[in-house]
Image: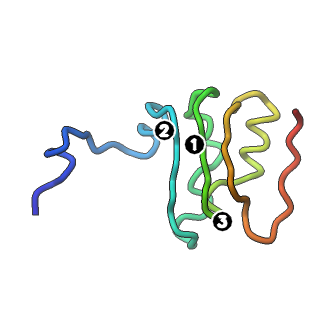
Amino acid sequence: MPRLDRHAGAERVSLEKLLRRSDVCVAPLPAHRGNAGLINAARLNLMNPQRWCCQHRPGPLVVESDLAAALNEGRSQAPRFDVLSVNRRPPTIRC
């Protein structure tokens, strides 16, 4: 089977390199243990503060306490969340 990335002119890169390069991070992944904490403090720090990090599905994909810390410290300015983790109180974010 041919590699589709080559045919589309795309380049296969690590998640860390992708986060450094991207203006928007949207990861519509299913909620399961393998994806828990995928977007954490270390990966949020790779992103430019003006870039968007979006979560549209319930689950522990983004470590919300790490995102709240990044927002409170001015390291992230543009999160977009339709949902937060299931059955959890949202983290405190100072505006």
Q: Nearer the viewer, mark 1 or mark 2?
A: 2
Residue that label 1 marks? 43
Name which residue type carries label 3.
Pro
Occupied quadrant, residue 61: bottom right
Q: Is residue 14 above or below residue 94?
A: below
Q: Is residue 61 above or below residue 94?
A: below
* Furthest-front residue in this view: 82
Q: Residue at x 10, y 64 (%)?
A: 1
Q: Residue at x 56, y 33 (%)?
A: 47
Classify mark 2: helix, strand or loop. helix
Residue that label 2 marks? 19
Mark-to-mark CA distance, 3 and 2: 21 Å
Q: Residue 24 vs residue 59: left or right? A: left
Mark-to-mark CA distance, 1 and 3: 20 Å
Residue that label 3 marks? 58
Mark-to-mark CA distance, 1 and 2: 7 Å
Disc 3 crowd rating (10 Å Cα; few below 14, some 14-19, many 20+) is some
Classify mark 1: helix, strand or loop. helix
Q: Nearer the viewer, mark 1 or mark 3?
A: 3
Do the CB atoms of the residues marked 1 and 2 lie less than 8 Å apart?
yes
Disc 2 crowd rating (10 Å Cα; few below 14, some 14-19, many 20+) is many
Q: Earlier in the sequence, mark 1 or mark 3?
A: 1
Name which residue type carries label 2.
Leu
Name which residue type carries label 1.
Arg
Q: Nearer the viewer, residue 79 or 63?
A: 79
Classify mark 3: helix, strand or loop. loop
Occupied quadrant, residue 35: bottom right
Q: Earlier in the sequence, mark 1 or mark 2?
A: 2
Q: Which quadrant is the C terminus positioned in?
A: top right
